[in-house]
Image (cartoon, rainbow, N blue to C red):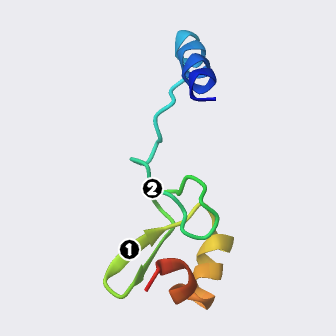
Amino acid sequence: MENKIKSLIKKLRRFGFSVKPKNKGLLDPVCGMEAANDIAFNYRGQTYFFCSDHCRGQFEKAPDRYSGQ
């Protein structure tokens, strides 16, 4: 499986596609998708980033569930 992924990445790069995350690898703690830099929430001194306002709302309802605290 790993070889297939590496092969796909090479093909994408050949056509000019970037395979690097746009946001330095920030992941939404609710859904696991790539998070946006502008949708954030501070909880207990830590900033969490989200892919959408919906996921941010889910986090705000139950922050301990998603923050691991």
Residue lying at the far top in this picture: please name it: 14
Alpha carbons under labels 1 and 2: distance apart: 11 Å
Q: Position of residue 24 (x, y in %)?
A: 39, 47
Q: Which dot marks residue 69?
A: none
Quadrant of the image for the C terminus?
A: bottom left
Q: Residue at x 57, y 84 (%)?
A: 65
Residue linked to disc 1: 47
User: Which of 4/16 is in front?
Assistant: 4
Specify the amino acid type for callout 2. Leu
User: Which of 67/21 is in front?
Assistant: 67
Specify the amino acid type for callout 1. Thr
Quadrant of the image for the N terminus?
A: top right
Q: Is residue 43 above or below residue 9?
A: below
Q: Is residue 13 above or below residue 37?
A: above
User: Which of 58/69 is in front?
Assistant: 69
Residue linked to disc 2: 26
- Which circle's residue, 1 or 2, is located before the other in the chain? 2
Query: So how many labels did they put on this image?
Result: 2
Q: Position of residue 5 (x, y in %)?
A: 60, 26
Q: Residue at x 57, y 29 (%)?
A: 2
Local SS, label 1: strand
Q: In the visual, does 45 lie left or right of 40?
A: left
Residue 37 figure quarter: bottom left
Q: Is residue 11 above or below residue 44?
A: above
- How many C-alpha atoms fall within 10 Å of the one at disc 1: few (<14), some, or many (≥20)? few
Q: Position of residue 32 (x, y in %)?
A: 59, 60
